[in-house]
Image: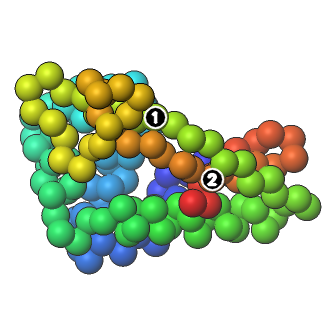
Amino acid sequence: MNLEMEVASAELGDTRLNKRLSLILERSLTHPNLSIPAAMHGRAEMEAAYRFFANENVTPQRIHAPHYAMTKLRIAQQPVGLLVQDTTELDLTRPHQQVEGAGPMSSNAQFGVFLHAMMAFAPEGIPLGLVW
């Protein structure tokens, strides 16, 4: 997947926000197991990432839209596209301050969200991207 092509059509209302999206994704894809502070290269990048997510023009829908569009193009190039649903628990439990919007999970001491994603695959099992 070419990251630049994947987010080229992002419409975040400002060219700088579009570039910041590419950088955040690049850092996150390089180290998917790291937190934002750990994945960014230095304090300035970390603060820029948090400003990015706090910007009212940056919404999940606007971030996902170009990826969904590219996924549809990849599906169209396949003879068959397989759509597979997966449920993942995102544990957002924090010891001292609860994350806003997190709900109860498998116990009263665990808070987070259940992510119900649908992914597209080629018949050979090659992932094509998220569709929902």
Q: Position of residue 114 (x, y in %)?
A: 45, 43
**Residue at image location 56% in from the left, 64% down from the top:** 68
According to the picture, the residue beneath numbered tag 1 turns out to be: 89
Residue type pointed to by label 2: Met
Say whether marks 1 and 2 touch (CB < 8 Å).
no
- Gap between marks 1 and 2, in whole Å? 14 Å
Residue 47 coordinates in the image, percent (x, y): 10, 44
Residue 128, image x and y in percent? 69, 51
Q: Please state if 14 lies on the left or on the right of 44 as rendered.
A: right
Which of the 4 image quarters holds residue 91? top left
Above-or-below relation of 70 to 130: below
Q: Residue at x 54, y 49 (%)?
A: 116
| Residue in the foreground of this view, choosing between 15 and 91 | 91
Which residue appears farthest toward the right when viewing the image?
Answer: 79
Residue receiving disc 2? 118
Q: Of the residues shown, which amino acid type is indicated by label 1?
A: Glu
Give the structural element (helix, strand or loop) at label 1.
strand
34 versus 16 height, above or below? above
Q: Quarter of the image for the C terminus: give it.
A: bottom right
